[in-house]
Image (tube, rainbow, N blue to C red):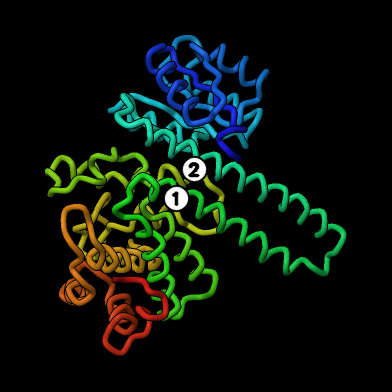
Amino acid sequence: MSAASAKILAIDDEPMVRESIAAYLEDSGFEMLQAFNGREGLDLFRREKPDLILVDLRMPEVDGLDVLSAVRGESPGTPIIVVSGTGVMQDAIEALRGGAWDFVTKPIADMAVLEHAVAKALERAALLRENAAYQTDLETRILDRTADLEKANVQLRAALTATVNSIATMAEMRDPYTAGHQKKVSLLAEALAKELGLSEDRVECVRVAGMVHDIGKVCVPLELLAKPSKLEVHEMEYIKMHSTWGHEILKDIPLPWPVAEIVLQHHERLDGSGYPRGLTGAALLQESRIIAVADVVEAMSSHRPYRPSMGVGLALAEITANRGIKYCPDCVDACKRLLGPDGSIQNAFCLLP
């Protein structure tokens, strides 16, 4: 959907915030509607049927969560972006679980960030509408052509993959320095799972978990994700919450694998030195152990705002030194076979710089 044809409803009880958002987006070509509270916003939503809604959480009478619930029940395909105050991460998590597609913190330092979130949400909404239309058509054809059931199942899995990819972009579009990190981890983890002889279904589980293992970073302020210097202790502790937030976001999504638990465990270590629960040994899912090794290797081998790439060699040295201590021995050995001097995965997948 082009900016010229998109209608956006901004709901906020702060006139200065609401009007500045409306003015900026109107200048970008969007048609803007404004509501000063949730009740008026829902009336406008039902009357005008906007293509996207921007809503504040903290409002009198009908708050942002009530708006989310009503819109999701009446029009689940309408994207909603929460515009909330800083320091309310728990509210943001609740909003995402309640159906919000993204959130932007107030005060908005750069309106371009909001416009980018709006553009991505509209793009995703268009893709989901196409997927929904395709799904409806597919189900009709299944009823008429039972012989095509096998093909239909493959196509449904492809639709699920597209949905997971859409969820994954929520994290990556907010952090340009780690763009592609989840995809690279997913590709390496998938190769490790195959190397370890996991079943096709479990390999797919690992691939999907890798694609969304950092989804909890949507709850981390951008200034921490892109900080060009070493993080303070309290900042690191805040970022460490991303695995817990990722679990909260994913746990109610009916995926056919324990993806939410794998995401929760991907920073756990065999010796209990990981987080958030300090799990040890057999308590760790094999899929989580695979993601952990892939995550460390990809992160060390890639550029970060606070340091240049450390290279594949140092990454392999790290997992080798902690083989059987922090990292699963089988996963480490498989990774060394794939990425070592005789391995072909670097050229085959162009995973790492």
Q: Is residue 100 visible?
A: yes
Q: Residues within 10 Å of mark 1 (few under 14, many from 20)?
A: many
Q: Residue at x 38, y 50 (%)?
A: 172
Q: Which residue is mark 1?
A: 169
Q: Residue at x 49, y 43 (%)?
A: 120
Residue furthest right as drawn = 144
Inter-mark Cα distance, 2 to 1: 9 Å
Above or below: residue 156 compared with residue 322: above
Q: Residue at x 38, y 71 (%)?
A: 188
Secondary structure under tag 1 reads: helix
Which of these two is toward me, 189 or 81?
Answer: 81
Above or below: residue 277 compared with residue 44: below
Sequence-wise, the earlier of marks 2 and 1 is: 2
Quarter of the figure with residue 317: bottom left
Residue 132, percent from left and from top: 68, 47
Residue 247, percent from left and from top: 40, 47
Is residue 102 left or right of 300 when viewed as pictured?
right
Q: Residue at x 18, y 68 (%)?
A: 310
Is residue 46 left or right of 65 when viewed as pictured?
right
Quarter of the figure with residue 332: bottom left
Kind of residue at badge 2: Lys
Q: Which residue is mark 2?
A: 120
Which of these two is toward me, 246 or 265?
Answer: 246
Cβ–Cβ under 8 Å for marks 2 and 1: yes
